[in-house]
Structures are given as C-alpha cells and as structure tokens.
Image: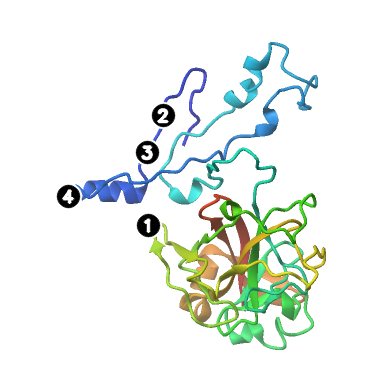
Amino acid sequence: MAFLNNSGDIILDAVLTDTGRYRMAKGDGSFKIAKFALADDEIDYSLYQNANWTGVGADGAHASGSAYYDLNILKTPILEAFTNNTSLMKHKLISIPRTNILYLPTLKLNALAGARGVKGQGALLQQASGTFYVATDSTTEGTTKLGGTTALGNAKWMEGFSTPGSVIRVDQGLDTTEIPPSISIPGDLKETQYIVEMDNRLGFIRKPAASEAATPSFIDDDNIASYYFTAGSDTDYIGDVPFANSDQVYVAAKDVIAGPRGTSINFSLGASIQLQTSTFLFTQLGGTEVISGVSYYVLDTIVRVTAATLGRSMTIPVRFIKAV
C-alpha cells in the first residue's frame, strides 16, 4: 500500500478485486465489466478555499483566484488502488438529475428509548460506548449475568442464540427542521434498497425480533456476507419510517430524522454456531473483559448498512459477548 504521486495528472489507477481476478482467470469470456461506482472517501471538501473558507491560515478565498480554490484538495495524498473490496467505496457518489435539491437524504441510527421498529419491536439501545452487545448463549443471558442488575440493562443487549426481543433500526430521510416531516419525501430521494454486510464467521442477519435467518446474497473471499433487501419485497425488514404519534411531527425523544421521512431498515443479529458453542474465535480474534464484576469473552466487529440507490452508508459497532 502506498500513496499516489499527485504532483502531476493522474489519469486512472485501477486494480481488480480478488473476485475480479478470479473471474478473469477463468478465461471463458464470462468476465465483463457491466457496472461501476465512484466514491470520494479520501476527499475533505472543507479544504475548498473560496470566499467562505475559514480553514488554517488567513480566512477567505485563495489569493491567486478561483482557479486555485481546489488546490488543497488536489494536493491531498491519495492511496493507490488496492484489491481488498471491504476497505473501499464507503461513500459512493450519486447522480440526481434535478437542480432544485436543497437537502440530501442521510442514514441515521435510531437507538432512542421508546422508538419502535417497522414491525413494532423496540429499537435496541446502545451502550455508552456506542456499541451493540449480542449474547451468544443462555448462560450469558442468565439472571446472574446480563439479565441481572449489571451495567448492561435488558434493553441494551440482544439474544444472539434465541429469538431476540429488539431490533437494530436505521432510518433514512431529510434530517432538517426547515421542511416539516409531514411533507412526503420526493420519490427519487426515498431509498428502496439496502445492503447489510457482516462477518459471516461471527454471525448472521435475521428477521426483526425473530429467529429466522436471512439468506446472504453473496459471501466474498474475505468471508463478508452481503444481504440485499428491497422495499415491497422484504417488508419484514423495510418499511416507511414510522411517526412517533398521529400528529406527524418531530419528537426528539423518539425520532432521529427531523424532516421528511424515507424508509427504515430493521434487523436482528444471530451469533454463529461457533460463537454459541465454542470460545475459539473469542480467543483468536477477541479477548476478555470484566463488566460489573463478571468476566466475559468479547469479540468486536461491525455491521455495515448501505443505501444501495442513494449511496449513503454507516457502520454499526457490534460486540459478541460470552460469559467465561
């Protein structure tokens, strides 16, 4: 891994992912580039030095004129292309053929007390660290462990081995107070497809507050499982962002989208059989931690949620936990 030399013009720096090289190596003519995506993960737009610039040094526009407004951005070190597909394209660019858009849609995690999921289940509350805890067996869930009066209240962890009683909820919409939430979001700004990714060795996605596992659409060479969900077809997972009350107003204690609402994706997590029955992956990839006087094996990972059409994505920290 290295940085590109951007002292001159860079026309294109591209590599095939591991899957792309595998398909090309088959040599049967089946390798075709049918789609591509663009992203701006390494770009800091606050470096654009126009009249509104308030960065390091003198405020205001670049002294040499508008041709130099983007000079600091062009000088930003950019990594060479590399083949690990899980490390790329976190912030994809989108094209919306309208010029009257004032606010772009966003994704926001809704872990507020009292928030309800698409199917009415309560949203899972975050730990103070921002992490979601998933218990991997009944001993961990037992009344002397997570179910007792420990640092983890019952509303702050999910059963990864049995039917969970709560969901992870992500809302989509226009997060602005300038447009009331009672106004419908334009159709081209309403997300209808989501991709949820997680490490297939550790766990799986399942229906909200249910034990039924979702079927991965694809598992790549790094054991990352991708689940594709579509509004209208996967109604157990996706629905319109519900209002906290019939007045269709923003309620700060229950809503994270202040303006027009789009869709909400809700899902539960299950622990893999290996995490449920063994400590091997905990000792190889995780560690131990004492919480309120009780020792646990812990293994940290992330779940990534991507709005497939509008390109927004977010990562959700997850900790699988097992009583020692």
Question: In 3D space, how far apart are the residues under numbered discs 2 and 4 (Cα atoms)?
Answer: 27 Å
Q: Which residue is mark 3?
A: 15
The C terminus, quarter of image = bottom right
Foreground label between 3 and 4: 4
The answer to whether 288 is drawn above or below residue 49 in the figure is below
- Label 3 SS: loop
Looking at the picture, how far across and down is residue 247, in whole percent? 80, 69
User: What kind of residue is marked 3?
Assistant: Val
Identify which amino acid the numbered label 2 is placed on. Answer: Leu
Q: Which mark is residue 28?
A: 4
Q: Nearer the viewer, mark 1 or mark 4?
A: 4
Q: Residues within 10 Å of mark 4 (few under 14, many from 20)?
A: few
* Image marks 2 and 3: residues in contact by CB distance under 8 Å: no
Of the numbered discs 3 and 4, the one sitting upstream in the chain is 3
Secondary structure at badge 1 equals loop
Foreground label between 2 and 1 = 2
Taking depth in this image into account, of 147 and 145 the one nearest to the observer is 147
- Is 174 drawn above or below residue 77 in the view shown? below
Whichever of labels 2 and 4 marks the residue nearer the N terminus, that label is: 2
Q: Mark 2 Cα within 10 Å, few/some/many (few <14, many 20+)?
A: few
Disc sitting over residue 221 in the figure: 1
Residue 60 image offset from top left, x and y in percent: 78, 21
Q: Quote the CA–CA distance across marks 2 and 1.
A: 26 Å
Residue tagged 2 = 12
For image coordinates 50% across by 48% down, the residue present is 87
